[in-house]
Amino acid sequence: MNRHLTRLCLAALLLAWTVVPGMAAEALDACPGRLDPAQPLVLSSAVAIALCADPQVREAWLSQLSSQASLDAEYSAYWPTVQAQASSGRASRKTRFDNFPEADSTLNTRTNSYGLNLNWVLYDFGLRAAKVEGARQLLNAASSSRVEKIQATVLATSKAFYQVQANAALLAAKRSAESLAASSLKAATAKYQAGAGEQSDRLQAQTTHDQAQLERVLAEGDYATAQGALASALGLSPSAPLTLTALNEPAGQEGEFMASVDALMEQARARHPAIEKARADWFATRARADEARAEGRPKVSLFSSYQQEDTPIDQVSTRQQIETWSVGVQITVPIFDGFLSRRRARAADYEAGAREQALEQAERSVALNVWKSRQALDARTRALVISRSFVASAGQSHQVALGRYKAGVGSIIELLRAQNELALAEQRRVESLVNWYTARLQLAADLGQLNGAL
């Protein structure tokens, strides 16, 4: 091969390497190991397991990798293209002259040919840049979609986790109410057997105890159902045994996310994955419009070719070796394409306008959701404080009523009323606690900051 062409190709490849933007490396994902039934399951571990078990999260991840590969493919336009060709064969050629037989000739030989062609687009008035920008924005949209799906899975798993904890706490409250009802029944039975109480009091206590047993059995069913739903979200059999950590007090987290509503809405507009996806879609359509306009503009390319032929039978009548080398600059100017580029650009402009309106709608929707979630969290926080006082006062009332009944100065109706109020207070306390955690989680999801709420 001609040494000049070799140097030209090496220089072209080296220069192309320096102008191609860097390509993003593929991120590695890691999943936790097998679930240990002996260890209490915490929320962060449950979320990690659910993310690995969710096929839609894996689908979103693969879609993002596909978009990354498409972006890398668009960068290939900045490199030169090099093509090689080679051929070899045998050929025969006979030439006869009717009036001059002395000039007749016959050629039987092997014919060979090989060559190398290089083409490198130097300037295209923004066509490649528009394609790269469009692919980059599609990657951003795929990334935001993946984050949005992850947040949805995290939210659903966290709610299922809290539901199991809530049902476990409610079951404990029902068992406590059943124990209180058993104590009241025991006290009413003892007074009746001693002749100091009425049969109606004992029967009322027995009815309350039976009702407490019924509610405890129903709570056990609700707890098993919630456990099955969580196990399914973790990719396990619904019958798989799960041991969760207990539902704890917020421990000073009540003030979290309690900034002004306007500040929270601005924060959500800047970071929420749904808004980021809508914004990336808008930018991608704008890039497509730029790409369509650039299609109708000139293109400047560097070309070079080298070819060596051994006896090309269609060109010579004797054995020869022909070597050809060329290099130059080529300018391609589109003259008329049936208004194709203009119409594609107009269609992309309209699509970009539609995507801009979709972005505005996404911003409004996120702002409204933040407003609702912020108000809900504020109400749940105040209800959480009140529920503590409710349980304390109901407990004291039950102790007083039980003492009065045993002393013979209180009625069974007073005792059962205090007992029911205590059971209701404990149930409301659990519901307030779970509602607070759920409202806090929902606000974090609407802000796009679920990682900070786990």
Image (cartoon, grey):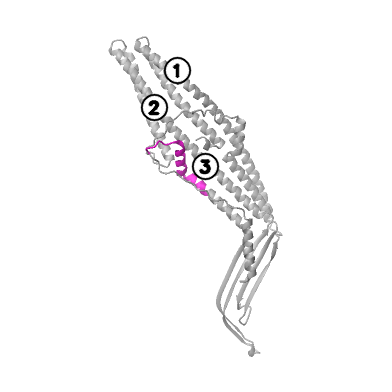
Label 3 sits on residue: 149
Q: Which mark identifies residue 393?
A: 1
Numbered disc 1: secondary structure = helix
Q: Is residue 179 left or right of residue 368?
A: left
Q: Amino acid at mark 1?
A: Ser
Magenta stretch encompasses residue 381: no
Which amino acid does the dot numbered 3 rest on? Lys
Q: Residues within 10 Å of mark 2 (few under 14, many from 20)?
A: some
* Magenta stretch bounds: 37-62
Question: Does the rendering let one see residue 365?
Answer: no
Say which amino acid is labelled 2.
Answer: Ala
Foreground disc of the pair 1, 3: 1
Distance CA(mark 1)–CA(mark 3): 45 Å
The residue beneath circle 2 is: 172
The quarter holding residue 202 reads top left
Near mark 1 (Cα within 10 A), the count class, few <14, some 14-19 or many ≥20, is some
**Does residue 255 sit above or below 272 in this rendering?**
above
Identify the residue at horizontal 42%, vertical 44% (top origin): 33
Mark 2 secondary-structure assignment = helix
Q: 132 or 14, which is in the foreground?
A: 14
Task: Give the camera-side residue of 174 and 76.
Answer: 76
Q: Secondary structure at mark 3?
A: helix
